Image: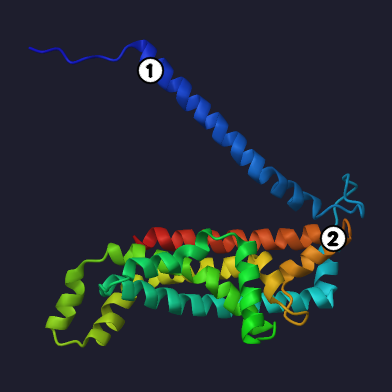
Amino acid sequence: MAMLPTSSPGSFSSVRLVNSVFRTWTAVVLLFLYLPVAVLLVYSFNSSRLNVRWEGFTLEWYRRVWANGPLLEAAGNSLLIGMVSGVLSVLLGTLGAWMLHRYRFRGGAALHLLATVPVVMPEILLGISLLVFFAAVGLGLGYTTVIIGHVTFSFPFVLLAVQARLRGLDPALEEAALDLGATPAQAFRHVILPALRPAIVAGGLMAFTLSWDELIVTYFTASASSATLPLRIFGLAKVGLNPMINALSALFVLLSVAVVVFSAYLKRHAR
């Protein structure tokens, strides 16, 4: 009877050492990424105006945020632009994903590549390109240009999420609906669309989060009346240390984390 090779104690020790190194490295990276965020959250309750040392607990800076008219107006702009951009991104991303999945035509791969380029394109390049384009066509900066800019880099995320869900669907579902007398439109509405709903919602939430947090593209496409909250925060930060920035950033972080976690939850249950 042939003897199965056995692992030596040294090999197990090497594996444990490698695993320990990777766990330590992962912990260091996570600490490097999230320690500044944790410090920001803590110091948003610091009573010190200079904000360089802890002097006591206070909610004063949050109160001043809620009493600041321009900041609230900018927050309203961010919410409006994020919602409109999210809806448009869902429509374009879902229809684009369905078209690329359902139909095979020449140039489909190139079209898919062009649609997903904004995902990897540097934001400053995208912002400058959009500004040049709007100037060339004579479109003044405002809510419309900001929404166009946000949809440009947001809808590919919806497209990719819906495409991933479409690849996991059984083609027999649509065929069965057609065999039972449904039209292609009815089959898409009553069979395909409900199966895609979790991925669509998750992609829409991701698009909203990207729009809500966006600064660089907004900087090149917004006017004074359509300035968003990230632009206002950037303006405050350029003037100097302001404790309200910590409070605003803390609210931004909490909202973004909530939306991203909910989006990840929906993606996981869409599989």
Kindly state the secondary structure of the residue where label 1 is placed.
helix
**Residue 219 appears anywhere in the view:** yes
Image quadrant of residue 71?
bottom right
Taking 209 as reference, is 44 above or below it? above
Residue denoted by label 1: 12
Residue at x-position 61% and y-position 70%? 129
The answer to which of 131 and 28 lies nearer the viewer is 131
Residue 267 image position (x, y, % from top left): 42, 61
Residue 87 image position (x, y, % from top left): 51, 79
Taking 40 as reference, is 162 above or below it? below
Q: Residues within 10 Å of mark 2 (few under 14, many from 20)?
A: few
Residue denoted by label 2: 238
The answer to which of 130 and 205 lies nearer the viewer is 130
Mark 2 → mark 1, Cα distance in angstroms: 54 Å
Residue at x-position 69% and y-position 79%? 77
**Residue 202 appears anywhere in the view:** no
Question: Viewed as shown, does residue 79 lie left or right of 17?
Answer: right
Image quadrant of residue 6?
top left
Residue type at numbered disc 1: Phe
Marks 2/1 in contact by CB < 8 Å: the verdict is: no
Instruction: Say whether disc 2 or disc 1 marks the residue closer to the N-terminus.
Output: 1
Check the image and tell me how it is coloured: rainbow
Furthest-front residue in view? Answer: 136
Question: Viewed as shown, does residue 56 lie left or right of 80?
Answer: right
- Mark in the foreground, 2 or 1: 2
The number of numbered discs placed on residues in the rendered structure image is 2
Question: Viewed as shown, does residue 263 lie left or right of 246?
Answer: left
Kindly state the secondary structure of the residue where label 2 is placed.
helix
Furthest-left residue in view? Answer: 1
